[in-house]
Image (cartoon, rainbow, N blue to C red):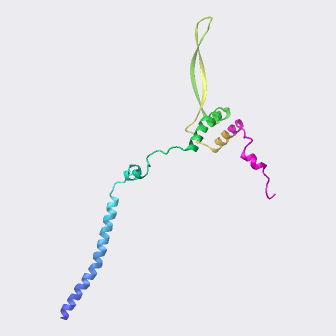
Amino acid sequence: MSNKKQSLKKIFTIISSMKKTIITLTFTISTLFLLNSCSSKVNISPSQNSALNSISNSGGKAKAGYMQKSMDSWIQNDWTPEVSQNKEIQKKYMKKVEDSTIHEEIEKQDANKLQTPDVNVQYKEDENRNFTLQEYVDKAAVYGKSHPADEKSNVKKLESMPVIGK
């Protein structure tokens, strides 16, 4: 009997050591399978992900709000025309574009057609030039000269208030 007990003990020790190995091996194989399956999928950009697009409209363009619309209209209708007409700004920051057009003049007396070239000089923003802070300061000074501050200016209100602690 003692022989059988010893053999059974050996079998149980082998099985218990195999349990640890089997558990470790099972965990390792499942981890490798999981990581390999994740890495083998083709990467999909967020804009192509239909599940993400059903939740949030990431592909749609955001509509401009009230402040952005008012700022855009002010820049287009007030700032740009005022600043771009200034001669100093034109010479310093804008690109000269010459457009030659031919005007026909008809003399009433001779009825001869005379063609005289007339060159229209226009200035346009140079898209390839880098924007500098000095350019903004110069343009703001030009705009400030043509649009002086109101009487209701907050700066004037603050300057007129009594100073505490002096």
Residue at 26 percent across and 85 percent down: it is 13
Query: Where does residue 103 sit, x and y in percent of width and height?
Result: 58, 16
Residue at 41 percent across and 49 percent down: it is 47
Name the residue furthest top.
109
Q: Nearer the viewer, residue 102 or 8?
A: 8
Query: Where does residue 142 sit, x and y in percent of width and height?
Result: 69, 37
Location of residue 70 by image quarter: top right
Query: Where does residue 104 sit, x and y in percent of width and height?
Result: 58, 14
Location of residue 11 by image quarter: bottom left
Q: Nearer the viewer, residue 162 or 102?
A: 162
Name the residue furthest right.
166
| Quarter in which the N terminus is drawn | bottom left
Side of 35 relative to 100 (left or right):
left
Question: Does the segment drawn in magenta span residue 48?
Answer: no
Query: Where does residue 124 sit, x and y in percent of width and height?
Result: 58, 32
Stretch in magenta:
141-166
| Quarter in which the C terminus is drawn | bottom right
